[in-house]
Amino acid sequence: MSAEKVIEEKKQGQALVTEQRTENHKKLFLESYGCQMNLNDSEIVASILAKEGFNTTSVLEEADLVLVNTCSIRDKAEQTVRKRLQYYNKVKEINPSMKVGVLGCMAERLKSKFLEEEKIVDLVVGPDAYRDLPNLVREVEAGRDAVNVILSKEETYGDVSPVRLNSNGVSAFVSITRGCDNMCTFCVVPFTRGRERSRDPKSILKEIRELADKNFKEVTLLGQNVDSYLWYGGGLKKDFKNASEIAKATAVDFAQLLEMCAVEFPRMRFRFATSNPQDMSLDVIHAMAKHKNICKYIHLPVQSGSNTVLKAMNRQHTREEYMKLVDNIYKIIPEIALSQDMIAGFCGETEKDHQDTLSLMEYVKYDFGFMFAYSERPGTLAAKKIEDDVPLATKKRRLAEIIALQQKHSLYRTKQHIGKVEEVLIEGTSKKSDAHWKGRNTQNTVVVFPKENYTLGDFVNVKIEDCTSATLIGKAIGITG
């Protein structure tokens, strides 16, 4: 999954807690770092272990089992996890019977090496092995280390109903694909999450129905690359050309899945993440334009505005193809909001390459973005074959310039909302004021307004009166019809 979906670190490290089962007596402390897919995976893990007698807890010291779901997208993310493990070690001095496990991408990347490097770790489980957790936990409880990091070509967890951890009861994630076939040279995801495979649309709609029955109002469809979604009865996308004619005739692609969701659940709002420019179909854009309940926002990672760098990254699109796609999106949905991922200082990046990135940003004027200095990830093609030759100081300077330009464009975009009346889904209380609600409009921009008599989960019309580069400020004028 692209860098845009990395959860802010200040939001990480919190215990993920769900409803308690009275028959369960063991306690699970579960933390999730990284992307939204990791958070959704943690919900799957909690569901699997709930059947094994575990209730989640927010009190680390009382846990029988501590699991940390990890991210490998950047070195900083991995260092955060290692520091957290050091803290667990201190707690284990107080509670020596506590067992500690590492899940997710970092577990998949390091495998059994984790047991050698981090003596506190008893359990290492990759993203495709969560069904084996009951067996692995029993191994650990018997005093043996346990490791399962085998990648699967079929696993989608489509039959597992995730519990909703720390849920606001309003919005939820539903995964539709796992893995990635795009071998971007900077990215470790294909090596930690395996080949791309899609989930049966019937199981997707069933999970959404369960959420609708619980009065959830918004679903985000998740995948490392949702645009590549393709269901033809199971199997890897690369094998579709060998499928039967019947399978091909009845196949469901992402545009069709979006249409199915929008039609079957007209009172629910839909988002999706993450897209890949090379796979983005205009059929998806037309489906978004057709249905009011599909939000008018696309995260469209580009990574660089330079053709030379894009080629080195093994991105399967050029600058010109990306710009043409953006033109078509704006033409079909003029009110669309676009966001970006951008990497500053990739291997071999020249000052001209950097200027190409800035000029692309000027052309698109993204609503917001997720920007990072390049850091080499072990195991990636770039780490193996391309020299990381851009000095750190240069990376930091270029990143600062990218961030400054994005802040300028973000303010430009938020100002366009002033004076308009926009539908907002109330998701919670504002961080800065208990007297204000916060929610998002269809473009995914945060909106803050006085609470008055409105309640969590309401769709409210809000007149936008002011803004910052990241937030719209307004006053509610009524419930939407």
Image: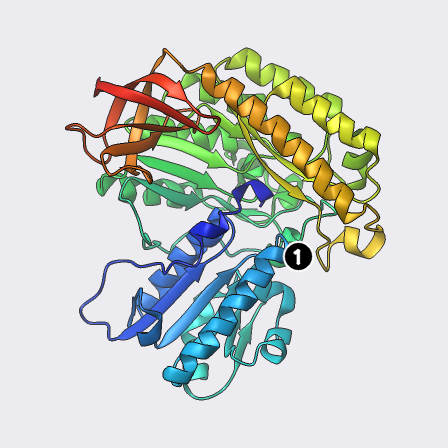
Q: On screen, 263 above or below 32?
A: above
Q: Which residue is more in the foreground, 276 or 255?
A: 276
Residue at horizontal 74 percent and vertical 21 percent from the top: 320
Residue at horizontal 23 percent and vertical 39 percent from the top: 215
Q: Visible in this render: residue 136?
A: no
Q: In this figure, which residue is indicated by the disc labeled 1?
A: 191
Q: Which residue is more in the foreground, 472 or 262?
A: 472
- For the residue labelled by badge 1, is the local secondary structure a helix, a strand or a loop? helix
Residue 285: image location, x then y, percent: 52, 21
Q: How is the image coloured?
A: rainbow
Residue 202: image location, x then y, percent: 39, 42
Q: On screen, 167 above or below 342?
A: below
Residue 191 shown left or right of residue 449 in the figure: right
Q: Visible in this render: residue 277?
A: yes
Residue at horizontal 25 percent and vertical 23 percent from the top: 460
Residue 95: image location, x then y, percent: 36, 82
Residue 362 shown left or right of residue 473 in the figure: right
Q: How many marks?
A: 1
Residue at horizontal 64 percent and vertical 30 percent from the top: 277
Which quarter of the picture shows residue 435? top left
Callout 1: 10 Å neighbours few (<14), some, many (20+)? some
Q: Which residue is more in the foreground, 207 or 319?
A: 319
Q: Identity of the amino acid at label 1?
A: Phe
Residue 165: image location, x then y, percent: 33, 54
Which quarter of the picture shows residue 321? top right
